[in-house]
Amino acid sequence: MDVDTIRSKAVECHEGYQYIFDKMGADQVTQYFRCRRRDISCKGRLHIKGGVKFVKGNHGGHEESPVDIEIASTISRIKRRAADTMEAPAVAINQCIAGLTVAGKGALSSIDTLKKTVRRVRRDNGPHIPIAPLNLFDLEIPNSFKEYEVEPGVFENFLLCDTGAGNNRIFLFGRQRGLEILSLSHQWFVDGTFKIAPSLFSQVFVILGCHNGGVHPCIYALLPNKNQSTYTQMLVEIKNLSPGIIAGSISVDYELAIHNAFRAEFPNVEIRGCFFHLLQNLKKQIGAAGLMA
């Protein structure tokens, strides 16, 4: 079982009991551990020397508890996952409790308590997260959030464009490789139909390009509104980032403001409506006319 620490002290599991590190022996080689059931003054001790474990004393005050070890191991995994990922708390927890025995599930803390554990670990160990601004004028992105770590110690810009403080502020995110793919792709796929967007923004807008037989997300935009002028400004910024870039054709939903913006910046573009969104709009119009069965 991979129980690492309890209150920052190393833990060893042996023959159904948990031991917490106490001190080093006089030889500075032997590690002394005591039974974690200090509340009942358990005399059980574990000595480790050269990887060999020796039990000293006895656990006369209590029985071994494999379930307790299983729970402690699970909590340890949840804490590590909380520190190593930014998954939603429920996702991190579910990944760690899969495979628990029935007895383990029955003894586990409530999901709400485990979620609090995840949030506490991230609060104590994670990077400083700035307070959410109240408007786009005050929004500042720390440098650490503007970069993408390509490999350990190697970074590149991920924030490609910030049009500057103001009510119509636009952010463009992506990698240089994404711009290269988009510039070589004759067909673009445009999607602005996501149902959620960060606070202060109205829309998450993604542009995808074709490469090696696949479709790849190239540009992620945060837009303050769905006005034609905003879409136009977004395309202008993309053209500034990749001079000479041309959109041959785009697959997009039926939002007229998007069509007009693309036609303004790419006069020869071929606009193809998305069949999925066509069906959505047809269903909406049929329902509005009272023709749905």
Image (cartoon, rainbow, N blue to C red):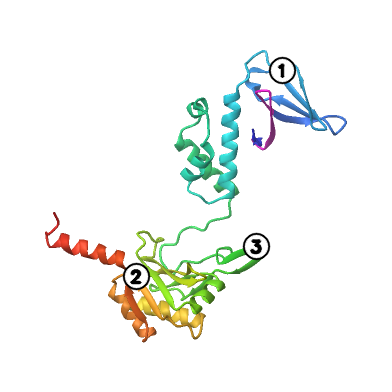
Q: Amino acid at mark 1?
A: Lys
For the point 57% across and 35% down, the residue is: 74
In the rendering, which numbered label is found on residue 158? none
Residue indicated by mark 3: 151
Separation of marks 3 and 2 at Cα, in angstroms: 35 Å
Residue 130 or 188: which is nearer the viewer? 188
Quarter of the image with the N terminus is: top right
Q: Secondary structure at mark 2?
A: loop
User: Does residue 145 appear anywhere in the picture?
Assistant: yes
Q: Secondary structure at mark 1?
A: loop
- Does the magenta segment cover residue 11? yes
Q: Is residue 159 above or below residue 195?
A: below
Separation of marks 2 and 1 at Cα, in angstroms: 68 Å
Task: Provide the residue span drawn in magenta.
Answer: 7-19
Residue indicated by mark 2: 225
Of helix, strand and loop, which mostly describes the magenta segment? strand
- Whichever of callouts 3 and 2 sits on the residue coming sooner in the sequence is 3
